[in-house]
Amino acid sequence: MKAVKVQYTVKPEYINENKKNIEKVMGALRVNPIKGMQYSAFVDQENPNTFIHINMAIDDDTMAKINEVQEFRDFRQALKASQPLVSPSATKLKPVGHGFDLT
């Protein structure tokens, strides 16, 4: 299994727009799920303009399929245009264990 965490901080005035854009991505994934992948987005409860996305997939090819989702590409473009306070930073995670099946 592969896992990546992406974290970034948006300007306060962009919080709601970012949430709407994330929901568009999630809606697209609900309509056309990517088999073998789980994608989630979170907001930091102590810093509400910091967002954390976790992508878990069975392999690198499956993980990369998120980039084929138009709503995800639109989200990334809008985020970049918003000039975040802290740019997205990706961290590869090494799974220790999980309680769900990605197959």
Image (cartoon, helix red, strand yellow):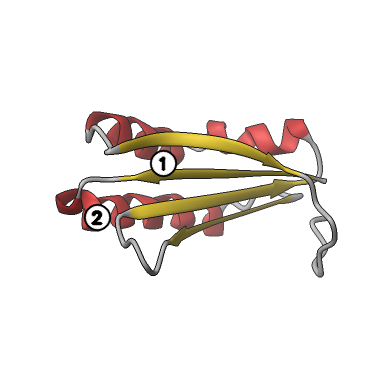
Residue lying furthest front: 46
Q: Name the residue under label 2.
A: 15
Number of disc labels: 2
The CA distance from mark 2 to mark 1 is 18 Å
Q: Which residue occupies the foreground of this view, 1 or 68?
A: 1
**Few, some or many residues within 10 Å of mark 2 (<14, 14–19, 20+):** some
Label 1 amino acid?
Glu
Q: Report helix, strand or loop for mark 2.
A: helix
**Residue 64, horizontal then vertical, whole percent:** 65, 32
Q: Is residue 16 left or right of residue 27?
A: left
**Residue 14, horizontal then vertical, whole percent:** 20, 49
Q: Report helix, strand or loop for mark 1.
A: helix
Earlier sequence position, callout 2 versus callout 1: 2
**Residue 29, horizontal then vertical, whole percent:** 54, 53
Residue at 33% x, 61% y is: 47
Label 2 amino acid?
Ile
